[in-house]
Image: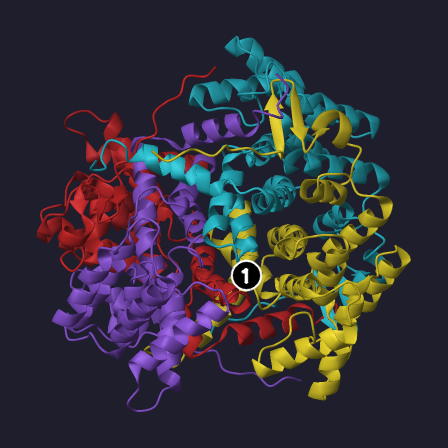
Chain colours: A purple, B red, C cyan, D yellow
Amino acid sequence: MREQNPIRSEMGWSTPDRIGVRGQDLVSDLIGKVSLGDVAWLEIMGTLPTPDESVLFNAMMVTMVEHGMTPNAIAARMTYLGAPESLNSAVAAGLCGLGTVFAGTAEGAARLLQDAFGNAGAEPDLGGIASRIVADFRAKKAQIPGLGHPVHKPIDPRTPKLFGLAREHGRFGAHCELMERIGAEATRVSGRPLPVNATGAIGAIASELGIDWRLCRGIAVMGRAIGLVGHIAEEIRNPIAREIWDRVDEEASEDTRPK
Amino acid sequence: MREQNPIRSEMGWSTPDRIGVRGQDLVSDLIGKVSLGDVAWLEIMGTLPTPDESVLFNAMMVTMVEHGMTPNAIAARMTYLGAPESLNSAVAAGLCGLGTVFAGTAEGAARLLQDAFGNAGAEPDLGGIASRIVADFRAKKAQIPGLGHPVHKPIDPRTPKLFGLAREHGRFGAHCELMERIGAEATRVSGRPLPVNATGAIGAIASELGIDWRLCRGIAVMGRAIGLVGHIAEEIRNPIAREIWDRVDEEASEDTRPK
Amino acid sequence: MREQNPIRSEMGWSTPDRIGVRGQDLVSDLIGKVSLGDVAWLEIMGTLPTPDESVLFNAMMVTMVEHGMTPNAIAARMTYLGAPESLNSAVAAGLCGLGTVFAGTAEGAARLLQDAFGNAGAEPDLGGIASRIVADFRAKKAQIPGLGHPVHKPIDPRTPKLFGLAREHGRFGAHCELMERIGAEATRVSGRPLPVNATGAIGAIASELGIDWRLCRGIAVMGRAIGLVGHIAEEIRNPIAREIWDRVDEEASEDTRPK
Amino acid sequence: MREQNPIRSEMGWSTPDRIGVRGQDLVSDLIGKVSLGDVAWLEIMGTLPTPDESVLFNAMMVTMVEHGMTPNAIAARMTYLGAPESLNSAVAAGLCGLGTVFAGTAEGAARLLQDAFGNAGAEPDLGGIASRIVADFRAKKAQIPGLGHPVHKPIDPRTPKLFGLAREHGRFGAHCELMERIGAEATRVSGRPLPVNATGAIGAIASELGIDWRLCRGIAVMGRAIGLVGHIAEEIRNPIAREIWDRVDEEASEDTRPK
């Protein structure tokens, strides 16, 4: 017989007249007193944020809420067209696409930085680390997560804003600096602009705030879940999903459909 | 040939150096200035919230963030166990369960209220409407959405808090009053406590704020997406999904598995 | 202390050298001997199908595999574009849209039929039942599930094929006949062609086979999961998702994007 | 102005009276004539399978349908508990967990094999390739996909069955042999049994059949989608999700919940 391990969670509990959320009383401590973004910090970090942490954490999530008619917004609207009774599933369908190509990339950037410092000594040589990382990725012919953007070039306007906030709020540390050096080195070596993009900046600042790289995709997930509800709200007011479908369907089968 | 309809969205746009979000400039107007919960209002309603709207809207979403080891939290952890490379899909799996039984019920409550006032005249008789609604549901042997709770009884502690905030911030109107009357009438008629629960209060306050009932499930979705990231964060720190799986698997096949 | 209920499942079990699946030995009884569609019947019904059951059950699932560039196929491709590392999540995103509007409608049709016979006596008057159902839906101004199709008109070519197979294989019973009568009555009363469509036929035949209406959406789910893998296969060979995205994004923000 | 690329798909088309599926007529060629598993091959490969291909392809999918109370089955049942109106979303939630840890591993195994032969010359030295692969993974301290199993040891009973079928049906080629050699070499070098498991065998046989490694996770997805419908069918007949939830919830908050 296998020995059982305990099943324990500190996320929350319920009694008939009370609800606990990470050590706080939901009704007396949180509802009406703490904003959604600050409760997100509480959920992940276990304490309410300091004012500096609050500004930076909200700023990172807000950055990821909305980016127009992205593939995940289209997926959510297509899903809603077939299942308007399940707004939750439409948002879920959209979130399924936040992978390695688009919004999930803060994870890769944070991992790169956290691994680099995990293996570095007390006084890391940032320039040397950046060169080594860029050379490694070139040898593997892989893209460095957190650099470059197909639309926002030569620079991603969100990056100076986020890094500026990090400076103002005392969190522009070695992770942020290393990220910038990686971008500069990649630009120099490749001969084309590869500056830090929004998810690169988020990966770096999240690392400064002590957030495990494995959670950094969650920053995009929390923001974009909100953005996808926004898209469904617009789809209700002004539906476009059916027109997208009709056009795609008509063109896609133009050559094979019998006339 | 079918005539094409235009495809238009006001959610956002991008140029190389700027990003628009519902008429605001993401970098200069939102990041670092507006909190996540207020950007959620912007996404859905198109304007930034007034201070009263901000308190109430954040309060409703915060109410839904965390409720301990719910079925959707278990689903998200099970998914993460099999696909730790896709935190986004684990959250998506959890959101798929926010349906008509648990957190999706604000939608049903808001629909009830908005339909009632849509069909009512200028000076609606709230008591009469409440009686009719309760009688209709009893005739159909259906549960009235937004009433009663298996754990939080005789009263759901979130409801007086939310309705109290609605009063403080000038939004305890006819929808809230009707919801309370429906709860009182259902309690009277059924002979057991059926007061307004948290999603009932949210459906009523959202209706006061002008939110379409078809979007009210989104309030839970936005909150719980955050809570599910919190559960994955704990699963990374202190994994319990495998133990849950092992116990369920062992017991489930106890009778049929050859010894 | 709450008293615990047992947790039991007959779906399957594992030992180091054997795997049981619904009373069969996976390795010696199923792999290489039983086709996928017949194992699907085993999973749901607990026995292997008779030859007649096998033909009809496979026919129903095959009917739902592929219908070109549907909204769920577009959603799956959009998801794959962002997360090519998670083919499973792309299929999941597509399945989220099999709701009440499109492929999920076999559920509604089967429910209608099973409820009708549940309440009927020994020798039900099918014409009378059909009239009552059509009148009820007209009074509610609701669409009858399983009737009519925007493209396949005046008749859905899948329906005569499926009902023909049901006749050949001895399963064209009262549920099928009632479904046809509902279609005829709805056509008569509304004055426009509302014949039984593919999901209506599937709901009726599934009812003849003893499948609970709550599972009938599963017939579409099993078929379409396969079709969505097919769409991802094509997306790998001949990618079109990015072009769809680019076009939608460009047109959607045409009026609001600064020039 | 960006130049547009065509949007074309060969998956299917519709006219009022016909439906095309990969060059076949759905009604006259497929429904009632071709089984679900063979239509799956058609969807992915574009032709109907030969009898040998049919046996092997069905065998691989059947292998993945059911494995008892897996994490994805638990996730699907938890989702159904909250959203019984969306069976499709419950299956979707389950599929989200078919990632790199469990059922998605056929993808990794197939990639390993296809990459190895892509880089090898005309007469590859299988022993040398196997040694190099095992050494590479040991250097990275990574697990080799497709080897070993926590329960099915020392050998996974599905593997000899699948490889036996591959031999019988003339498809036990170099990919299968290399997979076996990798298992033997890993066992030798690590000093513990690491034979080829079911997903390793599937990755190898799928490679013999010409299936791109990026699609191999789809074999599990198509099979398990069916298995998850089976679990929901049992959940309807004999519900256990609530008991699982109750037990987990009670134990998880035992230490933190006020008494």
Going 37% across and 53% down the picture, which residue do you hit?
B103
Quadrant of residue B142 within the rendered picture: top left
Going 75% across and 65% down the picture, which residue do you hit?
D201
Q: Is residue D253 visible?
A: no
Q: Is residue A82 above or below residue D229?
A: above
Q: How many marks?
A: 1
Q: Which quadrant is the C terminus of chain C positioned in?
A: top left
| In the displayed structure image, the side of residue D141 where residue B89 appears, left or right | left
Front one among C202 and D213:
D213
Q: Position of residue C193 (x, y in %)?
A: 57, 12
Mark 1 nearby-residue class (10 Å; few <14, some 14–19, many ≥20): many
Q: Which residue is mark 1?
A: D97
| In the displayed structure image, the side of residue B76 where residue B252 appears, left or right | right
| In the displayed structure image, the side of residue D58 where residue C182 appears, left or right | left
Q: Position of residue C38 (x, y in %)?
A: 78, 46
Q: Position of residue D221 (x, y in %)?
A: 63, 54
Quadrant of residue A131 within the rendered picture: bottom left
Q: Secondary structure at mark 1?
A: loop
The residue furthest right is D168
Q: Is residue C184 above or below residue D159?
A: above
Q: Is residue C237 above or below residue B79?
A: above
Front one among B210 and D158:
D158
Mark 1: amino acid: Gly
Going 14% across and 51% down the picture, which residue do you hit?
B29
